[in-house]
Image (spheres, rainbow, N blue to C red):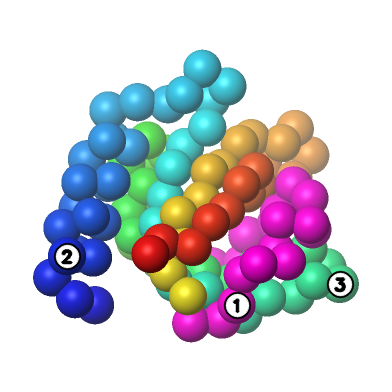
Amino acid sequence: MNKALNVFIAAFAMLAAFSLHAADVASGIGKVNKINNDSGFINLSHEAIPALKWPAMTMDIKVADRKILSGVKPGQVVSFGLVKDPKAGYVISHIETVK
């Protein structure tokens, strides 16, 4: 990753560490590895998410709505929000590419 992106990721991680939004959304940044539109899962290698006390890791995460995956491709760096679903655990509520 280039230096500007590393600075952005560090700043974003610091902001995420200090707050959860009113709707209890935790924010993260990661690289998309795979997308499974049929099952509604995305595989991400994400930075640490301090608001949830998650270390950096690679994992499959369910999306709240499969439509949000339409503009996302493997290899892209994305920012995303996680909300707690009573049945599925944490799911991605929104996702967008980091420019």
Q: Which mark is residue 73?
A: 1
Residue 45 appears in the picture as rendered:
no
Q: Which residue is mark 2?
A: 4
Give above or below for 90 relative to 20. below
| Residue toward you, 59 or 68 | 68
Q: Kindly state the secondary structure of the residue where label 3 is placed.
A: loop
Residue 42 falls within the magenta-colored stretch: no
Give the quarter of the figure containing the N terminus: bottom left
Q: Residue at x 42, y 50 (%)?
A: 28
Few, some or many residues within 10 Å of mark 2 (<14, 14–19, 20+): few
Q: Earlier in the sequence, mark 1 or mark 3?
A: 3
The segment highlighted magenta reads 58-75
Amino acid under label 3? Answer: Asp
Across and down, in percent, residue 14 comes to 22, 40
Residues marked 1 and 2 touching at CB (< 8 Å): no
Q: Earlier in the sequence, mark 2 or mark 3?
A: 2
| Residue toward you, 92 or 55 | 92
Amino acid under label 2? Answer: Ala
| Residue toward you, 72 or 14 | 72
Which quadrant of the structure image shows residue 7? bottom left
Give the quarter of the figure containing the C terminus: bottom left
Q: Earlier in the sequence, mark 1 or mark 2?
A: 2
Q: Which residue is mark 3?
A: 38
Q: CA distance from mark 1 to mark 2?
A: 21 Å
Across and down, in percent, residue 23 comes to 58, 22
Horizontal arrangement in the rendering, residue 80 relative to residue 41 (left or right): left
Amino acid under label 1? Answer: Lys
Disc 1 versus disc 3: nearer the observer: 1
Residue 29 appears in the picture as rendered:
yes
Horizontal arrangement in the rendering, residue 61 relative to residue 52 (left or right): right
Disc 2 versus disc 3: nearer the observer: 2
Q: Kindly state the secondary structure of the residue where label 2 is placed.
A: helix
